[in-house]
Image: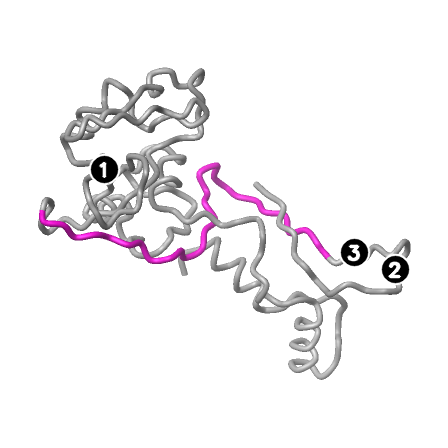
Amino acid sequence: VAQLPWRKRTAKSDVPFGISQDYEWIFVFAKSCQFIAATKGKERRYYETDDFPDRPWRTHDLTKQTTAAERPNSFFTMVDPKTGKKYPANPNATWRVTKDTFQDYYNKGKIVFPDDYDFLNISNPVMRYFKDDDMKKAGEDFGKVAVSSRLPENVGTLADAVAEYLAIFSRTLPENIGMTKEGTKEITDLFGSKIFTFPKPSQLIKFLVSISSKS
C-alpha cells in the first residue's frame, strides 16, 4: 500500500560523507484495496441559515482534479441564477457536476454561489453538504474519521468518500511518536537493561494501531 518514513534518531556527526541515515521505512500492507488509514480530523464547521431550517450544512470544493479533455461535460461556464454572474470552469480542474446535472443540484440546494451569503468568503461556487446526509453516509463513524478495512455503505466510490468526509492520513508521520532513544528508555525501564537493539517506541506502535483499527 505504502512506505512511511519514520525518523528514528537525530543526525549523527560520525558518518561517512557527512550524511546521516536518520530514517527507517515502515511498510504498509492491507487485506482490502478499499482500506483507508486515517486519523481523526478537525471538527467540521456547519452553518445554520434561515433558508434551510433544522438542516445545518457545510461547504466543499466544487472542482475536481480533472482536465477539460478528461471531463468535457463538466467544463462549462456556471451562471448564478439569481445574479446572472458567470463563473467559467478551470480547464485543469473542472466542476464536480456536469452541465446537464447542474440545475438538479442547484434546485436541491447543493450549490452555493458567492453572493448567496455575506458571511462566506468565497470567490467561486462551492458544493453544499448537509449534516444529516453526512451522518447517513458516515453512520457510526460520524464525528470521527473512519478507520476501517471497508467503506460505509452508500458512500459511492472510494474517491467520493475521501473527498466528502475522510481526513486521509499523510505519509509524513507526526513528530511526537518518538525515536529509538525513547524505545530504548522504555525497554530499560521495563526489564532493567537494553535487552535488544533498536526498539521501537510505544507511541509509534500506538499511532500505527490507531490508523489501522477502530478500537
Alpha carbons under labels 3 and 1: distance apart: 50 Å
Determine the image quadrant of residue 83.
top left
**Front of the two marks 1 and 2:** 1
User: Would you call the spot at circle 1 few (<14 residues within 10 Å), some (14-19), or many (20 or more)?
Assistant: many
> Mark 3 vs mark 1: which is more N-terminal?
3
Q: Quadrant of the C terminus?
A: bottom left
Determine the image quadrant of residue 130.
top left
Q: Are marks 3 and 1 in contact (CB under 8 Å)?
A: no
Q: Is residue 44 magenta?
A: yes
Please name the amino acid that badge 2 sits on: Val
Determine the image quadrant of residue 114.
top left
Q: How far across and down, in percent of the image, does residue 176 sit?
A: 57, 67
Q: How far across and down, in percent of the image, does residue 97 sit?
A: 29, 26
Write the start and end of the magenta stretch as one range.
23-50
Please name the amino acid that badge 1 sits on: Val
User: Would you call the spot at circle 3 few (<14 residues within 10 Å), some (14-19), or many (20 or more)?
Assistant: few
Q: Quadrant of the N terminus?
A: top right
Q: How far across and down, in percent of the image, does residue 173 sit?
A: 58, 56
Please state if 176 lies on the left or on the right of 211 as rendered.
Answer: right
Q: Which mark is residue 21?
A: 3
In this rendering, the answer to whether 24 lies above or below 107 is below
Q: Are marks 2 and 3 in contact (CB under 8 Å)?
A: yes
**Front of the two marks 3 and 1:** 1
According to the picture, the residue beneath numbered tag 1 turns out to be: 112
Q: Which mark is residue 15?
A: 2
> Mark 1 vs mark 2: which is more N-terminal?
2
